[in-house]
Image (cartoon, rainbow, N blue to C red):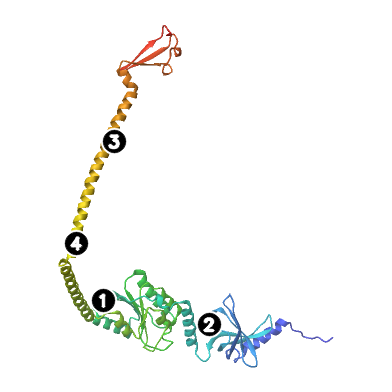
């Protein structure tokens, strides 16, 4: 038999894997298709297939790449996947290892925006019942935005012009980039933690969807929703809508519009107060005039005299009842006082001490303290105590004589 070189299955799969990974085209390729058989594993890895009308290819996206996606892949979604082709040695199955994904058509960011908006809306973060009203006259206003942006200068300028008595507090943050969303949340939480302000404005000037994206992050929406202090969202231009706008208690079209909403105009307040004063004064005069007319009408008719007579009659009846009650109480006390005297006399008669006062005595055995009622209870030599009204005397029995 000729000497034949035979390869193991593993060696063949490794060889094919090396060929695929060394290929310049297959090592960095974009593949478009429809997602099918999507499975998101508990480990965080995602397994799916890309298919078109004629064929399909298996794909895997590891957790590290999947966590960087702005949107959540869905079954049937048309996407463009960036990655490389290799072989899973155990099964001898080649597959596309996805490192990135773009939602074809609507765009990745817009798709992520729509998905998050729908999910939070279903969860109830945008419900009107949760919206808090803005204070009519805040004493302190907190602003979470960039310290160097034009939006901050506009808000301060408008606030100072409309009502210089209101204090303004700034929590400076980034308003675009990867760390911006975390800093915005820190600013909102800071004002809530120290309860320094009555209302919070969160926002920035206009920009592209990428520049405004930090206001579309879920963490920002939830922080706004959980704020105990009312939050006004003022992001971009009038046509720009972010997730923060829907989660906020009030959405302002621009940062300048937010300042107009939050800072009440001082002159308008004075005018409003003067109108209220005039209205209250006129209402009080009208009220007093109506009551005077009613009083004059009542005093000029017989109804007031009838009322007075009725009051006098009731007062007289009350006095009569009081006098009758006093008499009845005196009689009651006298009867019970007499009864008490009679009972006391009866008790004195029954009191053994009363007999002693009349010269009688009673005898007890000294040894047992037993009361001697008959001659048969004593014997010669017994010591007896004889009790009189003012004391007692002890005696020794020498002779016992029984009566007839």
Q: Count the marks: how many?
A: 4
Give 143 or 333, whichever is nearer the viewer. Answer: 333
Above or below 127: residue 342: above
Residue at mark 3? 336
Decide which of tag 3 and tag 1 comes sooner along the chain: 1
Residue 292 location (% of width, % of height) = 16, 70
Q: Residues within 10 Å of mark 3 (few under 14, many from 20)?
A: few
* Residue 209 shown left or right of residue 315 in the figure: right
* Residue 269 shows in the view: yes
Residue at mark 2? 72
As drawn, the label of residue 166 is 1
Residue at mark 4? 306
Above or below 106: residue 365: above
What's the distance in space between the residues labelled 3 and 2, CA to CA? 97 Å
Q: Quadrant of the N terminus?
A: bottom right
What's the distance in space between the residues labelled 4 and 3, CA to CA? 45 Å
Q: Quadrant of the C terminus?
A: top left
Which secondary structure, mark 4? Answer: helix
């Amino acid at each position: 038999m000729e000497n034949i070189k035979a390869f193991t299955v593993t060696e063949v799969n490794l060889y094919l894997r090396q060929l695929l990974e060394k290929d310049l085209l297959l090592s960095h390729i974009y593949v478009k298709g429809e997602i099918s058989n999507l499975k998101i594993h508990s480990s965080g890895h995602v397994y799916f297939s890309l298919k078109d009308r004629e064929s399909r290819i298996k794909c895997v996206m590891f957790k590290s790449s999947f966590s960087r996606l702005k949107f959540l892949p869905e079954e049937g979604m048309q996407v463009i996947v960036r990655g490389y082709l290799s072989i899973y040695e155990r099964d001898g199955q080649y597959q596309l290892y996805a490192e990135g994904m773009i939602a074809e058509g609507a765009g990745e960011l817009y798709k992520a925006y729509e998905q998050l908006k729908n999910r939070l809306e279903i969860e109830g973060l945008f419900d009107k019942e949760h919206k808090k009203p803005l204070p009519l006259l805040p004493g302190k206003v907190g602003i979470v935005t960039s310290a160097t942006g034009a939006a901050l200068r506009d808000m301060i300028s408008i606030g100072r012009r409309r009502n210089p008595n209101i204090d303004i507090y700034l929590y400076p943050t980034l308003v675009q980039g990867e760390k911006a969303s975390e800093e915005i949340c820190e600013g909102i939480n800071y004002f809530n933690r120290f309860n320094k302000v009555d209302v919070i404005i969160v926002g920035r000037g206009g920009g592209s969807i990428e520049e405004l994206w930090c206001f579309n992050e879920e963490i920002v929406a939830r922080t706004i929703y959980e704020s105990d202090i009312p939050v006004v969202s003022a992001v971009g231009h009038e046509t720009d809508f972010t997730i923060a706008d829907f989660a906020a208690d009030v959405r302002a079209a621009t940062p300048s519009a937010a300042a107009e909403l939050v800072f009440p105009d001082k002159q308008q307040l004075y005018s409003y107060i003067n109108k209220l004063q005039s209205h209250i004064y006129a209402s009080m005069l009208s009220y007093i005039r109506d009551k005077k007319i009613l009083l004059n009408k009542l005093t000029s008719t017989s109804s007031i005299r009838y009322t007075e007579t009725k009051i006098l009659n009731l007062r007289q009846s009350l006095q009569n009842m009081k006098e009758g009650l006093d008499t009845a109480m005196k009689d009651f006390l006298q009867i019970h006082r007499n009864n008490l005297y009679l009972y006391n006399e009866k008790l004195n008669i029954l009191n053994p001490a009363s007999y002693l006062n009349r010269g009688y005595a009673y005898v007890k055995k000294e040894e047992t303290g037993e009361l001697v009622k008959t001659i048969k209870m004593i014997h010669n030599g017994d010591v007896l105590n004889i009790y009189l009204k003012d004391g007692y005397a002890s005696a020794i029995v020498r002779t016992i004589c029984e009566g007839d």
